[in-house]
Image (spheres, rainbow, N blue to C red):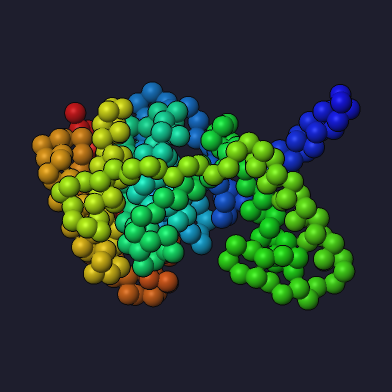
Amino acid sequence: MLAAALAGAGVAVLLLAADVFAHVRTEHVAGVNVWGYRGSPVPRKQQGEVRIVMAGGSTVFGWGLPDNESIPAFLERRLNQRGGRRYSVVNLGAPGQGAYGFVFDLEDFAYLDYDIVCLYEGYNDIGTITQRGLNNYLLWRRDSPVFRWTGYFPILPIVLREKAASLGGGASDQERVEFRGSAARRAVAGAMTAVADATNALSSHAGGPAPLPDNQAVSDECVEPWRRYCGSVRGAVEWSLAHGKRVLFITQPYVSDLHVEQQANVAAMLRARFAGEPRVRYVNLGDAIDMRDKTIAYDGVHLIAAGNDTIASKLVDPVMDAANAR
């Protein structure tokens, strides 16, 4: 029994070391750090520093770009170029996640001691961009029981499966790859898949995916089908205020008539619920970029680096105003 326990502990240590290595190799390119957010782990907040978190889906994450070309990274640089106070901006973007995930991310990363919350998501709750539809309950990080229990986000299974797929040894999450590789490549791919399976097995013993809500919050100021989306935004704003934060809700550049309708509803809710509250600001960037221009919005949703910098430039003044709000 002791030998088996020691062997199991040894395997766990090796898997953890491999996972940390995978994070180091990918966190600045297309992945996240060991705590589940983009970029290097931020240090303890310094005296006089203003810390901002930006929550949303893949457009916050900076899908297809290195972490230093995401909106939060550009925003941090532009804020600090103004001089005066020191600003840090943490990228909590979670691919595929909608407004329902806002409050969970704010809770999970409360230890970062942030001052300002930027909420930037509407696309993933329209129902036409992702397969999750209007009621998007995805919790990208909390689907990992390891993250829920420890705050550590394991990335090795994702990396190994994608690498194995590229070698011809299995299917990625996006597509099935037909194997045409050599026996040696097949052996490497098989080994990677085996380690991914072992890592997944460790997670499965800790529990399954996070449970779905029994009754998601709704907001009566909004009409169907936007009442649940508005309820999620309202819940995140209320949570932020209750914990002494200042909030910016930001409308992304418009991508469709449905998106325009959705954002008109959430703006009406914010006016009705938080009128006169100086710690809450609404920033409408709906017309900031023409999302039909494929040279800047290559797939009609995600922006190239220059587009992300444009969005960041328009957030500098609202963020600085929020930092001075009382």
Q: Which image quarter holds the N terminus?
A: top right
In the picture provided, is 70 more to the left or to the right than 241?
right
Above/below status of 286 relative to 67: below
Res 310 visible: no
- What's the residue at 37%, 58% (across, down)? 124
Which picture quadrant has residue 166?
A: bottom right
Residue 26 horizontal/vertical position (percent): 62, 51
In the picture provided, is 194 more to the left or to the right than 112?
right
Which picture quadrant has residue 178?
A: bottom right
Residue 224 horizontal/vertical position (percent): 22, 58
Res 115 visible: yes
- What's the residue at 86%, 30% (across, down)? 4
In the picture provided, is 170 more to the left or to the right than 106?
right
Number of marks drawn: 0
Residue 44 horizontal/vertical position (percent): 48, 27
Q: Nearer the viewer, residue 212 or 185?
A: 212
- What's the residue at 30%, 68% (across, down)? 255
- What's the residue at 20%, 43% (across, down)? 281
In the picture provided, is 88 more to the left or to the right than 142?
left
Q: Which image quarter holds the C terminus?
A: top left
